[in-house]
Amino acid sequence: MAATIAKRQGLDRYSDDKMRRIRGTSGISWQRRGVSKMLDRENMKDIAQEKEKERHVLQASSGAKKPRMNQDFGFSDSTRIPKKPRSALNRKVSYENGDEDEVLDKRASLEVEMSEELDYDAEELALIRIRERRRSRRLEPDGAMIKTNPHKGRQKIDSANSSSCSSSSTSSGSSNSVLKSNSNSNGRCTARNVKEKELERIKCHQCMKSERKYVVPCGKCRTKVYCIQCIKQWYPKMSELDVAEICPFCCRNCNCSVCLHTSGFIETSKTNMTDCEKVEHLRYLMVSLLPFIRQICEEQTQEIEFEASIQRVHSSKVGVSETLCGNDERVYCNHCATSIIDLHRSCPKCSYELCLTCCKEIREGRLSGRAEMKFQYVNRGYGYMHGGDPLPESCLHQTPDDHVEPSVMWSADDNGTISCPPTEMGGCGDCVLELTRILPDRWISDLEKEARDLVLILDNKLTNLRQNRAETGTDILCKAASREGSDDNLLYCPDSTKIQEDEELFRFQKHWIKGEPVIVRNVLDKVTGLSWEPMVMWRALCENVDSEVSSKMSEVKAIDCLASCEVEISTRQFFKGYTQGRTYDNFWPEMLKLKDWPPSDKFEDLMPRHCDEFISALPFQEYSDPRAGILNLAVKLPSGVLKPDLGPKTYIAYGVAEELGRGDSVTKLHCDMSDAVNILTHTEEVLLTEEQHSAVERLKKEHRAQDLKENLVQDGMDESIEEPNSDTNEEDTDVSEINDSELLPSGIRGEFKMSRDEMQGTAFTCPHSEGTMEESGGALWDIFRRQDVPKLEAYLRKHFKEFRHVYCSPVEQVIHPIHDQCFYLSSAHKKKLKEEFGVEPWTFEQKLGEAVFIPAGCPHQVRNLKSCTKVAVDFVSPENVDECLRLTKEFRLLPKNHRAKEDKLEIKKMILYAVAQAIKDANSLIPALN
């Protein structure tokens, strides 16, 4: 009895190795569908003779003494009733006289031998064992034996009485033999119960339910099983045969709750570099950033000279007090909200802080005001947004915008001294601002000198390596514009599956340094294939171990693209509309989108498995890897320093192919402060019904009439411009003869495998796999060149009254045409922009699995042609630091409460820490070069 209890208590301590052997002995090797039927009882007769042989083999291997059987009749020497020989497959061996592992190994080896002799497949053997197990006797908790009688049902027979009856008709030796036989039988039944209970505990790895009737075991790991329901619901691209061969867990794309919240499951970094390549990248980084460090040094030197004149001492004698600033703090200028990295002026009384740029503007008498924005759009009602009349004036609530902040003069003294501003501007007006520093004295100037000297050392060591480097092959380009007299109409568009890292990185840098976008195809083909279905992602959040996070996921705040404002909606209803579509009462398509979802900067913590999958899919990880990109300045910040939130972030939005004109699922024209890469991870096409098409055509006419009534359409501009047929044959098209109509969405992307010198006069084709149709794009991108930004801003300032924004109200005020993010240029506006200013963007469709690299400083807009899930991450490349600085200067001139006002990037801080880390890393690698 004690042995039985010990075995039951030991069930939960089974190791994975023992579990594999237990399941291995069952011989369940599902090479076919894991759904079976019981074999007929007649099948047992065909292998009766083989079972007798099995019994002798097991009897010899177990070492236990059995009653001696008469070879002729099967009787023992005693007078016991003869029994039918039991199959060795179902013989249970007591664990009392031997180790459990040894018994399992013996049974496994025996079954391998039997499977070879009988030539049965594993499934038939498993079914035979199931039948034998059901026919076997069972031991109940009270110790009684259960015997099945076809006429009287189940009867309980006391084992002790049975033993005494048997012993009364035999000698003492025979009695001992019978008792020993009963003891062995009890041990075998106990072992049978242990194993049956263990097998009953097998649960579907996905839903963790053990009551599933049909499950498919994995033929590779032999430890995981998936039920049919979960395979169909959560792995629609995998058949049951696929799961039987290798399960999602072994494929590393399991989306069960446990796996979705496991990080480090896959390798995210795909970059393997030698020490020489690392040193070369570090040298490239330092060379790119040295000019900006010199610029920072010059700004600080100029301010120290002003302080020297105020103190009437030599600049080398100027004492600058150090202010205490923790690593988890950000110091901003109180006037322009720009980040402060080191030298600045501070009030000793009220701690008002002023950056060096504002100090310079005050001394030059050109400090501009930073008044707050007072304008607010008016909600004129649901009917107005759909082309009807606005609500009566009495129902409108508008914040007065006639308030003007008083103008306060703020100037410096003749010797350059700057006083604290008056209370109207946030200061105290009583003290003189003192020069203070955050970093150690002369740290920046010493850093610049050390980097310059190290670059000279590395130049000598890497000369031979750079001389032997030569570009081979040709660029893979796709056409995205038809600007006349321009050599940048083609975009670099490699395939991620064919990228040779060394060569392709060099080509990427060649295009990237010119400020050109880059499109990389098929980036999801090189990862594990984790599902990006919105419901899978939502389930990952709802099943989060943090109950506070899970409770907030039942509802989401989405943006209604028609009204350009937030609405609350059930998460389930939102994702239902993602796949099936939603409409307003008048059948106009309702476009909703989630921006920066989940609503937290902890995407890596809330969805660790999806975060790892995304990072592993990133191409050119030297730049894009948010954890270890060697050329990504954002990862160079020390661990204790407060870092900007650069993602990854998820963008989930509805979309339809037809351009509606109002309420399109769009990301309006804007310009990011940093570089970014955006991957389209999932699409769902939603088609409009005939009823919706009719409603859209009718409402477009009402919109047109409303625009004419409010003078929003000028110069005969017509919004209903037909897009060109996407089936146009491009095979014989000459690059120099491409007309203007090709800037529109359909059929614009033809690929080239040639150099730019070979473009003119060369025919091109759009390559497709043989026998396959080209997949339609999920999102339409328009990216403008940096040199076209002044003309683009001029066009928007000229025509801003032709656009609608919040509540479909006309745009009445423009602070900054791009940073306001209130314009989307339709096909008609893009055509008009080219006619008036000669400006045309790069236009292309992003397809599923494509990554789009957007350089900093390039304005861009996006329209979703399908319901799309996109994941993006920002990074800072050394080639575009100058654009980051330029945008920082633009943002500081915006009003205080402008959406783009805050300097979240802190680019100057990144420059300093990136060079400091590059020096440290390069010095550690120099010995390897020797």
Image (cartoon, helix red, strand yellow):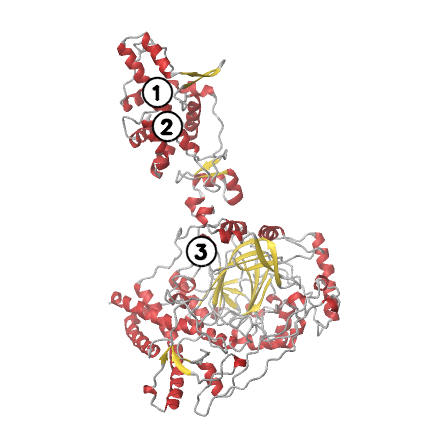
Image-based side of 725 in relation to 368, left or right: right
Q: From where the camera sits, is residue 204 visible?
A: yes
What amino acid is found at the position of numbered circle 2 in the picture? Ser
Q: Earlier in the sequence, mark 2 or mark 3?
A: 2
How many angstroms separate mark 2 from mark 3 (CA)? 49 Å
28 w.r.t. 441: above or below: above
Residue annotated with mark 2:
115
**Which quarter of the figure is the N terminus placed in?**
top left
Mark 3 Cα shell of 10 Å, populated few (<14), some (14-19), many (≥20): some
How many angstroms separate mark 3 from mark 1 (CA)? 55 Å
Image-based side of 527 in relation to 825, left or right: left
What amino acid is found at the position of numbered circle 3 in the picture? Asp
In the foreground, 567 or 39: 567
Residue at far top of view = 169
Comparing labels 2 and 1, the label whose residue is closer to the camera: 1
What secondary structure is found at the residue carrying circle 2?
A: helix
